[in-house]
Structures are given as C-alpha cells and as structure tokens.
Image: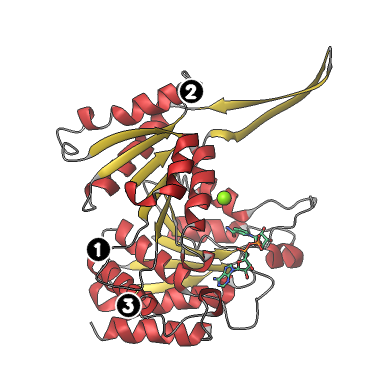
Amino acid sequence: KSLTVGLIPADGIGREVIPAARDAILAVQTELPPVSFVDLLAGWDTFTRTGTALPAETVKTLKEECDCALFGSVSSPSRKVAGYSSPIVALRKELDLYANIRPVRSVSADPSKPPTTDLIVVRENTECLYVKDEKLTTGEHGKEARAIRLITERASTRIGRIAFELAKARPRKLLTIIHKSNVLSVTDGLFRESVRAVPPASNGAFDDVTIEEQLVDSAVYRLFREPQIYDVMVAPNLYGDIISDAAAALVGSLGVIPSINAGDNFVMGEPVHGSAPDIAGKGIANPIASIRSAALMLRHLGYASPADKIDKAVNDTLAPGKVLTADLGGSSSTQEVTGHVMKLIQAQ
Ligand code: NAI
Ligand code: MG
C-alpha cells in the first residue's frame, strides 16, 4: 500500500500554504504508508497560459494515480470570462465529491477551558438549488425567473451517513439536521426524512448519536448567540453554504479554517479561504487552514493518529499565541508558523 497525494496549489497564497500542508504530511509519514506527491496544475494562471482552468491531464492524474489531493485556492474573476469556469466546482463534479466537511473551532487562550465553538458543518455538495437549472421567461407582469431545487433521497441519505459517522466519532455525539420543512415540506421534508432514516437502516451503529433538528433561520441566529450548542450540523447545499461561512465568522480568521470535499472514492483537502491577492507573494499568509486540511484529509482516510498529531501541534501553536501570522494579530511569517508547527509535531 502507498499514499499518493495530488498537490494543486493553483493561485495566489495557495502556492504559499500548500507546501505547508505537504510538510505536515511529511512530518507524520512514519505513521503512514509510503507517501508520494504529484504536482498538478489548475486555476486562473493556468487558464491564462493554457486556455483551460482545469487541464485534462490534472483530472486524469487525480483519477488514475492519486488517493487524495490538496487544493490551494483559485483567483476567480468577478466578471464573466469566455471559456473560464471554476476548477474547484468542476473537480467536485468529476470526482463525485458529494460531501463538504468544514470543522470550525475557536482558539481558546486558556487551554484548560473548552473552546466555545467546536462544530462541524456537513454540507451536501451536489444538488439543491446549485443544480443551476434556471429559467428566465416573460409573464403578464414582466420578467419571471425560476430555479429548480433538486433534493434526492440518494444524495440526502449518503450525506446523512457521513454526518452520523462524524457525530459518532466525537465526544458529544450530537447531530443537528438543518432544514426548513415547515415551509418547503416536499424538498426539505425529503432531506430530513432521508437523514433520519440512516440510523434505522444501520443496525444500531448510530444508536448513541443524539438527533436534533433546527430550522435554518433560527439555526443561524443560535449559531451567533450560542455556538456551543452545536456539534455536527448537516444541511442541504444552499443552507450549508451559508451556515459554513457564517460559522467561519465566529473564529476570527479565514486563515485557520480547513475543509475537505469527500466522495466514496476520493477526498480533497482545501483551505476555506481564497487566493488573497492583497497579501499574495509576501510570505505572510496563514498556513494553518491548509495544515488542518491535510489533517482532516488524513483523518477521513482512516489515519486518525497522525491527524491527531497535526491537530495537536496546531492547537498548541494557536493557544499560547506567540507564533502567529498577521491575520491573528501576530507578526510571524508563513514559514515561521509552519516551522513551529512542524517542531511541535516532531516533539510528540
Ligand atoms: P479571500 O479568502 O482570498 O480573502 C479575504 C481576506 O482574508 C483577505 O483580506 C485576505 O488577505 C484574508 N485571508 C484569506 N486567507 C488568509 C490566510 N490564509 N492568511 C491570512 N489572511 C488571509 O477572499 P476574497 O478576497 O473574497 O477573494 C480573493 C480571490 O479568491 C477571488 O478571486 C475569489 O474568487 C477567490 N476565492 C477562491 C476560493 C477557493 O479557491 N475555494 C474561495 C473564496 C474566494
Ligand atoms: Mg461559500
């Protein structure tokens, strides 16, 4: 057995933080099967040089040679550019990465106190309003725009299973289903029922998981007022998109929040932030979101112990608050923070 990791730094600070994620994997490699890395192209720079943001070679290599991948960030233009489409959206589709998993954990200055926010947002990644089936027509009173919202039992069940597995692995074992089925009883009703049907179909595997439900609007309200009530939240695509960004706002910097895009056969780690053109090239980007994405990816692949080591080193860097990048109020460089985390991994 071996572990082949595709590296797709893409644009901007992606090129500065993905090397930190690679270093973190190398630092725990004695606990992994033999690791190798493959450098792959994608992104806006690639588009301007080659005419495609996601070369066929990149997709082919990921499918045929890689077990997993780490994606940096793309600089998507805000205007419409002929021929350009986001490589990250295309990759999620190509590799059927149907689950977007985003843990959000606040930094606690006092390590003896539990963090106030320590939750995971599990977002369905393939359907809902994002099937982009939109239509503009002209009616009696002018323009009318419609969008189809697709919710399937299959997609809701498989995201539900992922959410139950994550909840089961955590100390609190609490899963909150986010929906709005008081209004959208058919679509959100199917999502809710499909997620609820996972435990009865799983031979008691999830009997120890507590299930709660929350309407999406009040969920956002409570997220800001009392984030500590949440453990794992599972939501359809659109609500999940909004909730995961809202949750990110609770912990101060985008530079510390990791994610993975997961399917049954592939997983791709991805820091939540973008390419940060305002600080790109200066060597001051926070590498922690990327390092944590590597840990999350390893954990998803079943390598819990090396993932724990990386996460512990990150938390032990954040809590004392001495070696931090500027986004967290420090003055350390990307390399200094990365070096510090690696030192703490090796010391374990
Ligand atoms: P952004 O996440 O790139 O930056 C927002 C702010 O956070 C900036 O001030 C930036 O300096 C700061 N920041 C982000 N990550 C940081 C880090 N690791 N360390 C320190 N500071 C950090 O979002 P923005 O500015 O809205 O978008 C910039 C570009 O990134 C756009 O082209 C956008 O399309 C793209 N983008 C790509 C994403 C992806 O690849 N998944 C996600 C979000 C945006
Ligand atoms: Mg978003």
In depth, the one of 168 and 317 nearer the eye is 317
- Expressed as whole percent of the image width and height from the top left, the position of residue 287 reads 49, 75
Mark 2 / mark 1, whichever is N-terminal: 2
Mark 3 / mark 2, whichever is N-terminal: 2
Residue to which mark 2 is pinned: 187
In depth, the one of 198 and 61 nearer the eye is 198
Tell which residue pokes out farthest to the top in this image: 140
Q: Secondary structure at mark 2?
A: helix
Q: Secondary structure at mark 3?
A: helix
Label of residue 316 in the image: 3
Q: Nearer the viewer, mark 3 or mark 1?
A: 3
- Image quarter in which the C terminus is found: bottom left
Residue type, mark 3 in image: Asp
Q: How is the image coloured?
A: secondary structure
Mark 3 / mark 1, whichever is N-terminal: 1
Residue at 36% x, 83% y is 342
Residue to which mark 1 is pinned: 304
Residue at 41% x, 60% y is 68
